[in-house]
Image: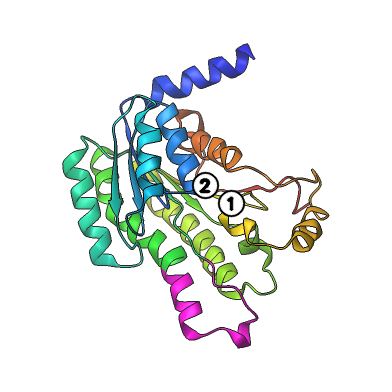
Amino acid sequence: MKREENRNDTQRDCAAGKTAVVTGASRGIGRAAALKMASMGMNVALIAGHESDALKEAVKAVEDLGVKAKEYAADVSDGAAVAAAVQKISAEFDDLDVLVNDAGITRDGLFLSMKDEDVSSVIGVNLEGTMLMTKALLPFFMRRRSGRIVNLSSVVGLSGNVGQANYAASKAGVIGFTKSIALEYARKGITCNAVAPGFIGTDMTAKMTDAAKEKVLGSIAMKRMGTCEEVADLIGFLVSDQSRYITGQIIAIDGGMQI
C-alpha cells in the first residue's frame, strides 16, 4: 500500500498544473481517463460529440477533485469543429500538455450488410478523429518540446472480429498512426502510445446479450471483464513522467484475452 501511495504521489507531483484534453469524455473510458488526469492534479478539457447531462456531470466530477475543468461539444471527425474547439481550449487554459483520444463509435454487422455510412462514420470518428485532434494539438506540444499522446485502439485492431470489420479497421489504423507519430515527433520531446482494451465494462458491452458476454468471458484468462478505471490507470501511467522513455507502443489491457 505504501509503495502504491508513493507512486501516486510521484504522478501527482509531476502532473500538477498541467492540462489534459480528453475526447469521448462524457462516459466510459473517456470519463474515467478525465477523472484519472484530475486525480493526478491536471486541469482537464472534456470533449464529447454533443452537449449532454452526462458531459456536465463528468465536468462536475472532475471539478470536485480540485482542478479546473471545462466542457466542449465537438464532432472530432469534423476538422473545422476540432479547430474551433482547440482554439477555445487554448484560450481558456494556460498550457496544453496531454491528449487522450478516446472518442469512438460502433456500427456492427457483417460486412456485406454494412451501409456505406456504417463504414465512413466509424472510420471518421475512430481514426480520422484521432488524427484531426492530434494534428490540432501537436503545434502546442512542439512549441514546448513536450507532450503526451495516448490513443485508444482495441484488441480487435490487433486480431479482427466477426461483425466489426469497420471498427477493427479503424482501430488497426490507430495503431499505424500511433507508431508513425511516435517516430516523427520523438525528437521534439513528444511521446505517442496506444492502449488496446479488451472486454471492458462500457455502454458498448452493456448492449451485448448474456450469452455473448459469457462466450467472450470464456476466452479471457482472468475470466472477467475489465473496468474503465483499470484502463484509465494505464493511461495515467503513459502520460506521467514515469513513462518518459516509452513511445510508439501498443499496450493491450485485456486480462489475458490475447494470450
Q: Is there a contact, CB below 8 Å, between mark 1 and mark 2?
A: yes
Task: Measure the alpha-carbon separation of dots 1 and 2.
Answer: 7 Å
Q: Is residue 193 visible?
A: no
- Badge 2: few (under 14), some or many (20 or more) residues near its Cα, within 10 Å? many
Q: Is the image coloured rainbow, by chain, by secondary structure, or in one colour?
A: rainbow
In the image, 128: left or right of 74? right
Q: What residue type is labelled 1?
A: Thr
Horizontal side, residue 139 vs residue 99: left or right: left
Furthest toward the front, the residue is 53
Q: How many numbered callouts?
A: 2
Q: x, y (%) of residue 253?
A: 65, 46
Circle 1: is it few (<14), some (14-19), or many (20+) Cα within 10 Å? some
Q: What residue is shown at x 81% (from left), y 47% (from top)? A: 221
Spot occupied by residue 101 in the image (x, y as percentages of width and height): 43, 52
Q: Name the residue under label 1.
A: 202
Q: Where is residue 202 in the image (x, y as percent from the top left)?
A: 58, 51
In this view, the residue in front, 45 or 145, is: 45
Q: What element carries label 2?
A: helix
| Residue identified by numbered label 2 | 29
Reply above or below: 202 against 5: below
Q: Residue furthest top?
A: 2
In magenta, the rendered stretch is 106-124
Q: Is residue 104 magenta?
A: no
Residue at horizontal 61%, vertical 11%? 2
> In which image quadrant can residue 209 be found?
bottom right
Is the residue 120 above or below the residue 215 in the image? Answer: below
